[in-house]
Image (cartoon, rainbow, N blue to C red):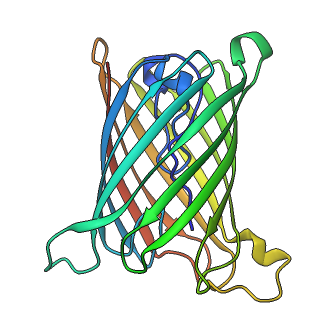
Amino acid sequence: MFFIALIATAPAPAEDVPYLFSGITPDKQGNRHFFGASFSYGDRSSRPVAVDGVEVKFFSGFPLSDTISIKGFYGLETYDLTKDLSTGSAGGDVAVKILDEVRHGLSLYASAGYRREFQPSGTDVATGSVTFGKSVKGFNLLGVFYLEKPFSKERDSVDVITSAAASYSFTNWLRWGVEYVGEDLEDIWEAEEAEGGARHLAATVVNLSPDGWTTQFTMGWGIGLTAGSAASVGRFLMLINF
């Protein structure tokens, strides 16, 4: 399963959500409350990056302290464009800041969460991640190691996902970046892989954060790099800080 727990680094407004598939960290929001919505389309894709069809997702979060924040989401989806959207998944997580980039030169976060997939299987999924980031002279680098445990005999016992992303701020309101996501990487050491083996996706993304606005927009498109990967995934995301 691809990773979209929304997590990243650095306090500048234009850097709040420079990526689509690699996430949102607490201090990326400047320790502010945030609300967002995304529209995704996937062709042969899988949760949580995008369903194989259309998904509309709403998410919100807020800080409990300088080091702890919580986030929740609710997603509507359809596998058939001729049918109405219905509940697809819901869940949330708690993130803890371990290292602060200003003081330590590197940001580091750990999170744990839960997702309930209502369609098509009604599966409960436990999630966990480690995220690190670094910003240098307009460049932002991000890495994520993500695990999820589906409570289903028809799924892998544990899914392993990694992502790496880099972006550059061309102006104080425009950022462009690239991402890589590796899915089901546990296939490297498992003889039997219930979900078809390791898959790889590469994406390009643009982030717009107009001066003086509390709202920003992120959009992008990704393609699969191997035969078993998603054919394509697109997403448009809007985030409001308050």
Residue 181: which quarter of the image? Answer: bottom right
7 and 221: which is toward the camera: 7
The single residue placed furthest to the right in the displayed view is 189
Residue 211: which quarter of the image? Answer: top left
**Which residue appears at 44% of the width and 23% of the height?**
14
Q: Is residue 2 above or below residue 9?
A: below
Number of residue marks:
0
Residue 97: which quarter of the image? Answer: top right
Quadrant where the C terminus lies?
A: top left
One can see residue 58 in this view: yes
Picture coordinates of residue 91, whole percent (x, y): 44, 52
Q: Is residue 73 above or below residue 44?
A: above
Picture coordinates of residue 46, whole percent (x, y): 47, 72
**Which residue appears at 53% of the width and 17% of the height?**
11
170 and 52: which is toward the camera: 52
Picture coordinates of residue 81, whole percent (x, y): 19, 77
Judge from the rendering whether residue 67 lies leftward or rightward of residue 64; answer left or right: right
**Which residue appears at 56% of the width and 77% of the height?**
229
Judge from the rendering whether residue 35 lies leftward or rightward of residue 2; answer left or right: left
Q: Is residue 215 above or below residue 65?
A: below
**Which residue appears at 64% of the width and 18% of the height?**
137
Picture coordinates of residue 121, whole percent (x, y): 43, 80
Quadrant where the N terminus lies?
A: bottom right
One can see residue 49 in this view: no
